Image (tube, rainbow, N blue to C red):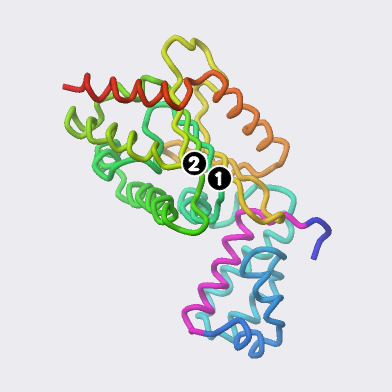
């Protein structure tokens, strides 16, 4: 394993694919390892992206699991690219879509720092709110947003709930997305989720003027494993993009800290949301 290995999002997607193949065949780590000639520890580390998956090992697993040839070849090509590009985050030329993968990272993360500009953060959106935003123009993206929301909701009652820190401008509260009734329900939902001890909702007041990261929404994800660096996720209506270079994610973390310093406190933010609820017609 390379010294001080840090798995990229692509390498982690490869690990999940390997784990999925084994799960489909209902094999334990020990059984699968014996079949392919790996130790169960090595196989576990590959699946969890604690060590890189060598292309030859991916090929061996595909053969032993009797995975259709085009499927294992596609994953092997990803592993080859990851091997060549390790340390870089450029995913051009590989059929890997961060927008499609993002819900998986949300499920794996321990902390989510979200700065949204125009909308309630995706993880807190009601289904109707998401549908109103998308206006049925992009059913694939709507389904992906639903997966992100469900990934967070599934963690609420677990042993390791996902901590979410959200910051957004006050204007988000006054955009009657989907009409007054839906918007009121969305704001009430926002108040409800903010009561969870793992959730922080902070609002940037109109009086804040210019603020850090203005015009540049982002999500920063943190993970429990030392081998998994923070990942920043940026998205437009065209595509999603991962930023994984530590220097850049550190700048995102600094920006988010600055945003929290400018935003209202949790209590004041809740009061502002409650005011918006009463104002919605």
Q: CA distance from mark 1 to mark 2?
A: 6 Å
Q: Is residue 35 above or below residue 220?
A: below
Q: Return the residue at label 1.
A: 111
SS of the residue under disc 1: strand
| The label number, if any, that marks residue 121 in the structure image | none
Region rendered in magenta: 5-26
**Residue 185 image position (x, y, % from top left):** 23, 35
Residue 178 drawn at (x, y percent): 21, 33
Q: Is residue 15 above or below residue 234?
A: below
Between 255 and 66, the one nearer to me in the picture: 255
Give the residue displayed 20% in from the left and 22% down from the top.
280
Can you say which quadrant of the picture contains the C terminus?
top left
The image quadrant of residue 253 is top right
Give residue 154's position: percent from left, percent from top.
40, 56
Which is more N-terminal, label 2 or label 1? 1
Which element is circle 2 on?
strand
Name the residue rendered at 69%, 71% in the picture. Answer: 55
Report the quarter where the N terminus lies: bottom right
- Residue 272 in magenta stretch: no
Is 260 left or right of 178, judged from the image as shown? right
Viewer-side residue, 190 vs 108: 190
| Label 1 with label 2: CB-CB less than 8 Å | yes
Please tell me how crowded label 1 is: few (under 14), some (14-19), or many (20+) other residues with Cα within 10 Å: many
Other-residue count near label 2 (Cα within 10 Å), few / some / many at <14 / 14–19 / ≥20? many
Residue 22 within the segment the image draws in magenta: yes
Residue denoted by label 2: 164
Name the main secondary structure of what is drawn in magenta. helix
Picture coordinates of residue 165, whole percent (x, y): 50, 36
**Residue at 38% across, 48% down:** 149
Residue reaching furthest to the right: 3
Asked whether 5 or 65 is in front, the reply is 5
**Which of the 4 image quadrants contains residue 77?**
bottom right
């Amino acid at each position: 394993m390379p010294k001080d290995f840090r798995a990229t999002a692509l390498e982690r997607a490869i690990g999940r694919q390997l784990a999925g193949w084994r799960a489909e065949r209902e094999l334990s780590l020990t059984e699968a390892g014996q079949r392919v000639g790996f130790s169960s520890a090595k196989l576990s580390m590959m699946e969890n992206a604690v060590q890189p998956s060598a292309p030859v090992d991916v090929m061996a697993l595909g053969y032993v699991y009797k995975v259709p040839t085009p499927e294992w070849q596609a994953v092997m090509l990803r592993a080859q690219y990851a091997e060549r590009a390790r340390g870089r985050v450029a995913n051009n030329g590989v059929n890997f879509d961060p927008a499609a993968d993002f819900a998986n990272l949300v499920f794996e993360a321990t902390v989510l720092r979200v700065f949204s500009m125009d909308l309630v953060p995706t993880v807190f959106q009601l289904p109707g709110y998401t549908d109103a935003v998308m206006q049925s123009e992009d059913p694939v993206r709507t389904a992906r947003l639903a997966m992100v929301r469900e990934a967070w909701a599934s963690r609420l009652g677990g042993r390791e709930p996902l901590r979410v820190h959200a910051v957004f401008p006050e204007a988000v509260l006054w955009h009657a997305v989907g009409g007054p009734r839906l918007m009121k329900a969305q704001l009430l939902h926002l108040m409800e989720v903010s009561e969870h001890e793992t959730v922080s909702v902070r609002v940037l007041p109109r009086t804040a003027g210019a603020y850090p990261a203005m015009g540049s929404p982002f999500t920063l994800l943190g993970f429990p494993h030392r081998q998994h660096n923070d990942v920043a996720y940026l998205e437009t209506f065209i595509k999603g993009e991962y930023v994984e270079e530590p220097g850049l994610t550190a700048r995102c973390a600094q920006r988010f800290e600055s945003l929290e310093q400018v935003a209202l406190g949790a209590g004041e933010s809740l009061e502002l949301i409650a005011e918006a609820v009463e104002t919605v017609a």
